[in-house]
Image (cartoon, rainbow, N blue to C red):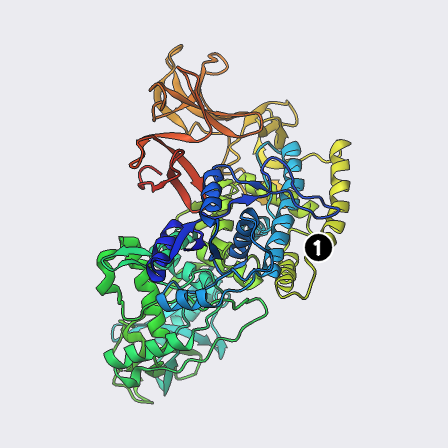
Amino acid sequence: MKLVIVESPSKAKTIKRYLGKDYEVLASKGHIRDLPVSKFGVDLDTLEAEYEILSGKQKTVKELRSKAKGKEVFLASDNDREGEAIAWHVSKVLELPEDESNRIVFNEITKNAIQKAIKSPKKINMNMVDAQFARRVLDRIVGYKISPMLWKILQKGLSAGRVQSVALRFIVELENKISDFISHDYYKFFMKFNNEKIPLVKYMGKKVTNNTFVNDKEKDEVFSEMKGSKYAVSKISRRTKTKKQPFPFTTSTLQQTAINTFGWSAKKTMQVAQKLYEGIETDEGNIAFITYMRTDSTRISDEAKNSARDFINKIYGDKYIGSQKEKKVSNKIQDAHEAIRPTYVDKTPETVKKNFSKDEYKLYNLIWTRFIASQMSPSKYDVLKVDISDEKDKFLFQFSVEKVIFDGHEVVYNKNSDEKEFPNLKEGQEIVPDEIVSEKDQTKPPARYSEASLVKELESKGIGRPSTFATIISTLLNREYIKKEGRELKPTLLGNVVSDFLTNNFSNIINSEFTSNLETELDKVENNSVNWKKVIKDFYKDFSLNLDEINKRIKEGKLKIVYKTNLKCDCGGEYKLIFGRYGGYLKCEKCEKNKSLDMMSFAPINKGIIDLKNLTEKKESNLLDEKCPECGKPLALKNGRFGEFIACTGYPDCKYTRNVQIEAPCPKCGGKISKLKSKKGKVYFKCNDCGEMFWKEPSGKKCEECGEPLYIKNKKAGKVLYCDKCKVEYKMDDDEE
C-alpha cells in the first residue's frame, strides 16, 4: 500500500477513485501544526520557529503517523505556497527523509493529472516554504507588535494586519475624498427624435462636460437658442467594430464577476469554487469539475485548448474557433497555475446540473461559459454614427447604432440583446426634433468600493495574492472596521480611527507601495533570488526603531488619541472623542459631560474632525423583546470589558445584568448555557446548572456517526458542526449560521 495525503476529505475521495486499491488517501484537513497561538513563537535574532500541533488535530496526526508506517508516502496538498508549507509540516511530523521525492502537484483533479503526478514526484520546494514562512513571520511581527498598542490607547480586542490595514486605508481614504467632495448642479441637453433621446455632445466646438452649463441664466439663453435652431444630419460614418473574446477567469476576475452578477461576497465565491475543485458526488463517483481556483494567470494548457476547439467545432462550427493570444504576464503575476477552467469541457452545465446545488450550478455555468467563450472567435458589429448639427455649428448632437455581423463568442457569453435597426437617414437631411429637453443633474462623488472594485484595486496595486483577497475583506468585516451597506463598503468610526492611527504612526509600512514591494520580495524568495532571512531582518530593522519610539511616547503619556467633533453640548461646549478603559466615548471639553458613542457606526473623519451630523448618542439598537425582572424596563444587548452581556436600559437607576445565553442546552445536563469571555479575550461557554465549561459552542445536535454532541467550529471558510469524538465535520444550514 501507498499513502497519499491531501488537504481535504472531499478531495481525498475524488483522488482515491483515480488511484485504485494500491493507494490509501487521507486528509490532513488543512494545517496540522503552526506557530503557537499564545505567544510570538519566533526568535527574532536567529529566526528559529517554535511549532506546535494545532488544537483538535492530535487525532489526525496520530492517524497519519499510524497509516504512514511502512508505506511510501506522497504529499499532495495544494500547489501553492500554503500547500507547500502544509506538505513540509506533514513531512516533519511524520519524520520523512528530507531529501525524499514525495511531493506531487497538479492543477486539476482528473485521472490523467493525478496519475501523471504520482509517476513524477518531486522534492518539497523549500523556497516556497521559506516564502510562506517569511510572510507568516512578517504578518506576526505586525500583528503581535502593533495590536498591543491599539489595546493600550484605543480599546482591548483590536488588531492590526500588515495587508488588511492597507486595504482598510484604501477604503478610509476614499471615504475622505467622498466627504470632501463639493457637489454642484449642471444641465444636460437632449434632442428627442424618432423615439431616440440624443445627447448634446459638443457646444461651440468643445466637448460638453458637467462644467459646461452650470449657470441658470446662461442655460436659459442656450436652451432658448437651441429650441429655435434648425438642424440637419451633418455627418454619417460607418465602421466595423470587433469585440474580443474574454480571457478565462483568474481568482480576481472570478470574484469580481460573481460579486457583480450574483451579489455574492468574495468569501462565498471561493467557498463554492473550492467545492467544485475538490469534487462533488455524482452517479460516476466524486468528480472535480474545475481546475485550481487560486491563480493570477490566464494561461491555458494545450490539451485544454484542443478539447475546447473540438467542442466548439462540433457544436458551433469551425468559424467559431478562435486563436486568442496569451495575456501579457506582468511582474506581479506568479503564473504558477492555469486559469480557472472546467476540467471536462464536455460536461456542460445543463448535463451535470442535477449534481449541483443552486449556487454550485451558477458558478460552474459562469466558469464553463467564460472558458468556452475565451477559446471562440471575436464578435463583429457594424456601427453607424450620426452627427446632427444646427446651421451655425454651435450644437452637435450625436448617437450611434450597432448591428451584429457575426456573434462569435457572444453566442455563449454576454450576448448583446439590445440591438436596433439602422435609421434611414442621409447626410444633409433636415431633422425636425420632436422636442429639445434639458435635465438638471448634480456632480457625484467617487463611488465607494464594492467587494468587486476593492478586489480589482488590491490586484492592480499588487496588494496580497489571489488566495488572500477574500480573507482580507472578511477580516475587515469581522473586526467591524468596515460595514457592508448594499454592495458598498463603508468604514466604521472604529475603522476610521484605527486606520488614522496606523497611517500617522506607521506610514512607512501601512502603504500600498511598501506592501506591494514586500510581495515582490516574497516572490524573489520563492524564486531563490533573495534570502528569506534577509527580507525579515531588513523589515524588522526599520520597524523596530519606529516601534520603540511609539512605545516610548505611549509610556510617557505623550501619545493619546483625542478627536474634535462637530457635535455641540447643551452647555455650548464641543464634544471630543476620547478613549478610556472600554473604548471610545464623547466628553464635553467645557462641562465634562460624557456621552456614549457607537464606534461601529458610520462617521467620517474630515480634516481631523469627526463628522457626527448623522450620529449622536449611542442608540439602543440591540433592544430585546424582554422586560427587566426587577424594574420592568426593556433589556438590551450591550458590550463590556468581557464581551456581550444583557443589561437593563434603566441603568444607572436599575443595575440588573446577566450573561448572554445560547439557545442550545448543555450537552451534559440539559441546562442553560452562558456565553462568556475570559480576561485574555477568549470566548467560552459555561452551563449555569452543572458548571461544565466548553471552548466550542454547543449546537444542540448529535453526530450521525457516533451520537455524541456536535459543537460549532469557526473555520476560514465559515462555520461547521464538529464532533470532538470522531472528528467529523458537518455543513451548517444557512439559518443555523
Does the rendering let one see residue 649? no
Q: Quadrant of the C terminus?
A: top left
In front: 576, or 198?
576
Q: Indicate the position of residue 563 as horizontal and vertical percent values.
A: 64, 37
Q: Name the residue furthest bottom.
A: 427
- Near mark 1 (Cα within 10 A), the count class, few <14, some 14-19 or many ≥20, is some
The image shows residue 686, relative to residue 302, as above or below, that is: above
Does the rendering let one see residue 310? yes
Q: Residue at x 57, y 44 (%)?
A: 34
In front: 5, or 541?
5
The image shows residue 338, relative to residue 58, as above or below, that is: below
Please name the amino acid that badge 1 sits on. Lys
Q: Indicate the position of residue 683 as horizontal and vertical percent values.
A: 49, 29
The kind of secondary structure element at disc 1 is helix
Q: Name the residue furthest front.
A: 70
Q: Is residue 415 left or right of residue 61?
A: left
In front: 460, or 279?
279
Q: Quadrant of the N terminus?
A: bottom left
Q: Name the residue furthest top.
A: 630
In front: 229, or 658?
658
Q: Indicate the position of residue 467 as horizontal and vertical percent values.
A: 49, 56
**Residue 199 appears in which quarter of the rendering?**
bottom left
Q: Residue at x 34, y 62 (%)?
A: 18
Instruction: Please count the marks in the image.
Output: 1
Q: Which residue is mark 1?
A: 533
Q: Indicate the position of residue 472 as horizontal and vertical percent values.
A: 51, 50
Q: Residue at x 26, y 83 (%)?
A: 317
